[in-house]
Amino acid sequence: MGDMIYMAWRYLVYNRIKTAILILSIALIAFLPIGLNVLVSQSSESLTVRAMSTPLVIGEKGSPLELTLNSLYFESNTPPEISYSQVQRVNETNLANAIPLYNRFRSKEFPIVGTSIDYLDFRNLKLAQGRKMALLGECILGGAVAESLGLSVGDSIISTPESAFDLAGIYPLKMQIVGVLEYSGTPDDRAIFTDLKTTWIISGLAHGHQDLAKPEAATHVREKENGNIIANASVVNYNEITDENRDSFHFHGDPSTFPITAVIALPHDTKSGTLLQGKYLADTERMQIIRPSQVVDDLLETILTIQQYILAGAALTGGSTIMTAILVFVLSLRLRHSEIETMHRIGVPNHRVIALLGTEIAVVLISGIVLAAILTLLLARYGNFLIHNLLF
């Protein structure tokens, strides 16, 4: 038997290109349906766990899926903005605790999420270094953000302008990094967290000015009247918040009207959650309250339906590939007719020739299956990493 394996191996090595193509084709036939199931299973688990841990989300009426993806996974387009008064509305019911989210701005490809310290506790996010944000202009980075950009505590990061031509005079904000989160294997790893007021500054709802009462600011003063100082157009708007200018930042308008994108509501118990949902059922209600777990379940049903079509297509493709492989083997036998005749003339019995050819086929099949198993194990090991980097 050893001599059969040796001769089959030497033939396959000699025809290495044909052998490699056949092994790869067989590996893909076996791997595609299995790998797809593994990937869908892991992505479903990742989506479901995060959705199940988030009881209720409130936002303006529109697409529940868009609101869920933006609030939980920091993806999709920014949903319609709502006012901060919706946070106060939830807290005043005494049925749930409210966590605001303002996910509109980005720094490079990473979302800047304005929220409260309660969000970090809610998601059980731990600091790998530094501390939590406490002052205007401070932020903390998810583990993947810090690693990707090579940043750590003490460095700074700048928000990306939404438009190259910002006529409103809203400047990118340079934020001080005061903490870096441990890896959690969730979309939080790829987010930049700051407080709401900082994101409101990015949106232009607050700004700081030079102290016009100081002598060095005299060139920026247009007029002084009854103790009031009127600045001219040359006064500098800060795009960085420091200890020296932090007190100069001030907001214009009522903070309860300032924008956020969603509210995460944490009911005190099941009954409180049901009662809170009932408060948003009126026909005139502009807000919607959703259970992310239900939205994700609907999404997964769609994904599973698509998966069935993909598997059916993979089965047809696999069948065609198998037929092609059989054709290759048959044509190979025809091309090797003289070789087989030579083996018969030197006394090799017919069953040994058949065994040699069968061994060649078996080696190709086994190699393809082993390669498919290796690919499946790699996908099972690193599937979550791929999901979070490609989807989140």
Image: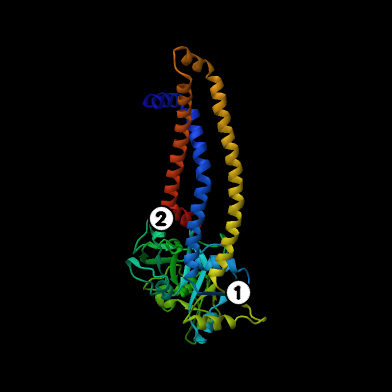
Which circle marks residue 60 in the picture?
1
Q: Residues within 10 Å of mark 1 (few under 14, many from 20)?
A: some
Mark 2 lies on residue: 148
269 vs 21: above or below: below
**Mark 1 or mark 2: which comes first in sequence?**
1
The quadrant in which the N terminus is found is top left
Is 12 on the left or on the right of 67, as rendered? Answer: left
Closest to the observer, 263 or 321: 321
User: Where does residue 125 sit, x and y in percent of width and height?
Assistant: 38, 68
User: Where does residue 285 sit, x and y in percent of width and height?
Assistant: 64, 80
Residue type marked 2: Ser
288 vs 24: above or below: below
Closest to the observer, 366 or 296: 366
224 vs 110: above or below: below
Q: How is the image coloured?
A: rainbow
Q: Residues within 10 Å of mark 2 (few under 14, many from 20)?
A: few
User: Where does residue 172 sit, x and y in percent of width and height?
Assistant: 49, 64
The secondary element bearing badge 1 is classed as strand
Asked if the residues shown at circle 1 and circle 2 are in contact, with their CB atoms under 8 angstroms apart, the answer is no
Residue at x 41% of width, y 59% of height: 145
The secondary element bearing badge 2 is classed as helix
Residue at x 41% of width, y 27% of height: 9
Residue type marked 1: Glu
- Residue projecting furthest to the left: 129
* Nearer to us: label 1 or label 2: 1
Q: Is residue 20 visible?
A: yes
- Residue projecting furthest to the right: 283
- Residue projecting furthest to the top: 345
Residue at x 56% of width, y 28% of height: 328
Residue at x 35% of width, y 68% of height: 126
Query: Residue 212 sits in which quadrant?
Result: bottom left
Closest to the observer, 216 or 330: 330
